[in-house]
């Protein structure tokens, strides 16, 4: 597929009508600011505003009018920036594909790779006679994997498609809003929620809505590095990321000092709801939550959090994952996750090691090292036993990839090699940093990171060296000590950006396509658990950098270093610098943004359209198709035919089947390929020239090379081969079958071909002496 310049330029006819939703999203935040301070014996009786400084809004009291106006302006700007992001991604999506003018099959083809697979279940639910029958078909699905009946609600995270399909059926919108637009508008609306969450996080950290405004502007301008929603709409990350950002906002608010009991309870429930939605919409939530649990563990060891805060945060994670476990019909992958094992180990060891935070600094450091070693040992033990008891092998390919990436294991494993050979899974490229620096985001971020890291180190040493008293005095002393050095909410966000930043530098992911063909010959299945680290980091990076520009603490430190302690100067700098940055960004990037939004292209993929049309009209409705994972996802969506394999790679048996299906691109005999196809029930096999004759990857990383290595065969082309590899005894199947040799035509019949695809029907076994059916008679006789 390619995106080419339009012959006729037309004005954009579709705009995103989200004003009411976004305004509501903005207004729903306005009820969290006012509350009354409790614990008068410790902190007095003044009020506290969650989105700013202290106020007097409690009970019948109201905020001063200036603060009310400031908050209203801040929330209004949050809504406007959210609408701007949603409108931008919708406009770019329309301009990129000319989506409004596409036929139905072209629109469905535009849902590439696993996007098409997920969207097909939304389509399937809408086409079902009733909601009950649609749910039953998903629970007892025999179309996604041939010769198998699987529970899709257990295997995949598709509750969002189920929810949207039910909502579309119930709402009176069918007459004026097509199902596909209802789907994509919902995803783009979540982008608005994402911006609001980042906006509120920056506002909470800095106490100024200018930080939120700067965050939203940076997020929109760095769209290439913060999101790819406009051309990968259905990916799980686009559903889950907004909820993760909301969860970080709730955690930031929960860790703010001087919250009342009611405010804390509200924040705990918000953390649970957002964590639950995040886990429900993305299968790799456990790896993100593991990093988050490590952040909480680090803050606990360095004495930045109280015992109740740590326990609450852990229990929120556990309860959310167990709730999802129940909804996903007791999915064993959740119970066997590392994060659950880690949390159980941490809580158990902490309970047994009660005197962890007592003694001299050296004694405490030794206890922490021993504590960490015990937690690590118990985590590995619990996780190993859990996987053995559950017979869990769904995520072993992820650990194979990690081991191979850091040279800790063999590199010939087919699944691991699929990821290792993708440039997208390498180190963060330098041009990413150049783009971030070009929008003035990288410089304040690095400076903020350095200052906060230094402050964190000083505060940690201070906490470790402070003597401990009784439990009540300990809690009070910890709170006061942290308030002087580094607030817990700031410390959490600092470690959040550090941890995910390190992961982004080690493993990141580019967009699948951006105006280029998306066939991606050796492209591994979409693995959001690895590639999403960059997008988690860059989005949160905007909030941290904005806090550095607008935060009072950092400017106080910098001006104090220069011996400028004037409060007037501090206020002037805090307001003038972000306004100056916004003005510079407007001057530099507004023309570029308008130019990008005015660039019109169109979807153009006639070969795939021809293939899908032929399958829909010339093959039986229950025909089984074998081929690449990416293509089969599109076949499932466009034609509804049965598949042998698909891009959702989190199943051991499916990975083995995919490797067997891909033998059509290896050096195998026609009899071996035929036996494989009959074993998995395939009626047709689709061969792609872009894979068979691939040149995109270097030697050793082409799909045919990976198969040769896995089969112990010497690779094509000039270059070195391992000494244990041997020459293959058969030619490459995808090339030889096109020569129409007798040994191939006896088992496979070509039924369709164009410049990109060749489709062969797998013949039924002939009885001895029966005549061979002609090519004209073979296809379509079961229609």
Image: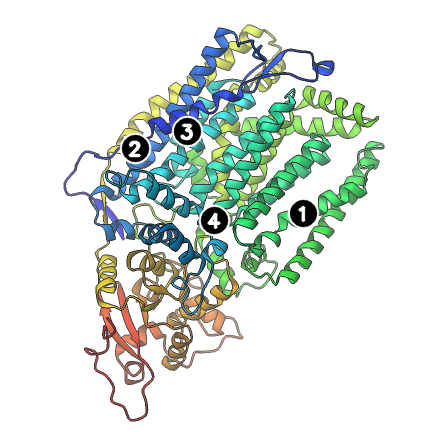
Q: Position of residue 455 (x, y in %)?
A: 66, 26
Alpha carbons under labels 4 and 1: distance apart? 22 Å
Alpha carbons under labels 1 and 3: distance apart? 39 Å
Alpha carbons under labels 3 and 2: distance apart? 26 Å
Mark 2 or 4, nearer chain start:
2
Mark 3 or 2, nearer chain start:
2
Mark 2 or 1, nearer chain start:
2
Q: For this view, does 431 lie left or right of residue 766? A: right
Residue designated by label 4: 528
Residue ID at (53%, 19%): 33
Residue designated by label 1: 342
Tag nearer the camera, 2 or 4: 2
Q: Secondary structure at mark 2?
A: loop
Whether the residues at callouts 2 and 4 have beta carbons within 8 Å, the answer is no
Q: For this view, does 100 lie left or right of residue 199? A: left
Residue designated by label 3: 439
- As displayed, is residue 108 above or below residue 434? below
Mark 4 or 1, nearer chain start:
1
């Amino acid at each position: 597929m390619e995106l080419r310049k339009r012959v006729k330029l037309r004005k954009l006819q579709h705009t995103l009508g989200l004003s009411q939703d976004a305004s509501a999203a903005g207004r729903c935040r306005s009820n969290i600011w006012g509350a009354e301070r409790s614990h008068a014996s410790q902190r007095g009786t003044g009020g506290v505003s969650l989105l700013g400084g202290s106020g007097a809004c409690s009970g019948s009291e109201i905020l001063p009018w200036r603060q009310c106006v400031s908050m209203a302006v801040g929330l209004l700007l949050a809504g406007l920036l959210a609408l701007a992001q949603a409108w931008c991604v919708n406009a770019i999506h329309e301009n990129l594909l000319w989506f409004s003018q596409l036929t139905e099959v072209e629109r469905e083809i535009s849902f590439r790779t696993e996007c098409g697979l997920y969207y097909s279940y939304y389509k399937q639910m809408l086409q079902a006679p009733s909601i009950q029958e649609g749910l039953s078909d998903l629970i007892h699905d025999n179309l996604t994997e041939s010769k198998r009946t699987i529970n899709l609600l257990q295997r995949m995270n598709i509750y969002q498609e189920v929810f949207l399909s039910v909502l579309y059926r119930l709402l009176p919108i069918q007459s004026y809003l097509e199902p596909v637009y209802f789907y994509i508008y919902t995803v783009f609306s979540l982008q608005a929620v994402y911006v609001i969450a980042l906006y509120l996080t920056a506002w909470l950290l800095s106490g100024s809505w200018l930080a939120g405004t700067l965050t939203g502007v940076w997020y929109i301008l760095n769209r290439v590095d913060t999101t790819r929603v406009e051309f990968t709409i259905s990916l799980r990350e686009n559903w889950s990321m907004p909820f993760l950002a909301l969860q970080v906002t709730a955690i930031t608010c929960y860790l703010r000092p001087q919250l009342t009991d009611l405010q804390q309870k509200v924040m705990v429930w918000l953390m649970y709801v957002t964590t639950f939605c995040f886990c429900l919409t993305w299968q790799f939530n456990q790896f993100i939550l593991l990093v988050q649990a490590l952040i909480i563990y680090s803050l606990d060891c360095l004495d930045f959090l109280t015992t109740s805060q740590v326990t609450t945060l852990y229990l929120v994670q556990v309860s959310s994952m167990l709730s999802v476990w129940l909804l996903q019909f007791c999915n064993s992958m959740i119970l066997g996750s590392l994060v659950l094992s880690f949390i159980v180990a941490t809580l158990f060891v902490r309970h047994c090691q009660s005197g962890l935070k007592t003694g001299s600094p050296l004694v405490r450091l030794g206890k922490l090292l021993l504590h960490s070693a015990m937690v690590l040992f118990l985590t590995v033990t619990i996780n190993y036993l859990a996987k053995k008891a559950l017979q869990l092998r769904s995520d072993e390919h992820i650990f194979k990839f990690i081991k191979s990436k850091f040279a800790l294991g063999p590199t010939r494993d087919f699944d691991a090699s699929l990821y290792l050979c993708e440039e997208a899974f390498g180190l963060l490229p330098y041009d990413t940093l150049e783009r971030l620096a070009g929008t003035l985001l990288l410089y304040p971020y690095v400076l903020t990171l350095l200052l906060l890291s230094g402050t964190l180190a000083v505060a940690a040493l201070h906490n470790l060296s402070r003597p401990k008293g009784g439990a009540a005095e300990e809690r009070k002393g910890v709170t006061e000590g942290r308030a002087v050095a580094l607030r817990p909410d700031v410390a959490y966000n600092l470690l959040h950006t550090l941890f995910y930043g390190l992961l982004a530098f080690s493993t990141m992911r580019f967009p699948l396509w951006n105006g280029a063909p998306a066939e991606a010959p050796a492209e591994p299945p979409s693995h959001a658990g690895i590639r999403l680290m960059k997008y988690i980091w860059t989005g949160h990076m905007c909030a941290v950098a904005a806090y550095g520009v607008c935060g009072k603490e950092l400017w106080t430190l910098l001006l104090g270093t220069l011996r400028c302690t004037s409060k007037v100067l501090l206020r002037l700098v805090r307001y003038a610098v972000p306004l100056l940055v916004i003005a510079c960004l407007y001057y530099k990037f507004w023309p570029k943004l308008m130019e990008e939004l005015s660039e019109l292209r169109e979807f153009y993929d006639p070969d795939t359209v021809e293939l899908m049309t032929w399958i829909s009209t010339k093959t039986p409705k229950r025909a089984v198709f074998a081929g690449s994972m990416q293509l089969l996802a599109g076949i499932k969506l466009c034609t509804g035919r049965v598949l042998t394999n698909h891009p959702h790679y989190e199943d051991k048996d499916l990975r083995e089947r995919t490797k067997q299906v891909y033998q059509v691109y290896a050096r195998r005999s026609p009899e071996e390929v035929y036996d494989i196809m009959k074993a998995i029930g395939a009626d047709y096999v689709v061969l792609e020239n872009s894979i068979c004759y691939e040149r995109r990857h270097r030697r050793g990383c082409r799909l045919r090379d990976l198969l040769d290595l896995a089969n112990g065969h010497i690779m094509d082309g000039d270059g070195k081969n391992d000494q244990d590899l041997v020459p293959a005894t058969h030619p490459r199947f995808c090339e030889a079958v096109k020569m129409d040799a007798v040994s191939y035509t006896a088992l496979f019949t070509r039924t369709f071909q164009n410049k990109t695809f060749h489709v062969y029907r797998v013949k039924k076994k002939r009885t001895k002496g029966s005549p061979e059916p002609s090519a004209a008679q073979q296809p379509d006789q079961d229609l």
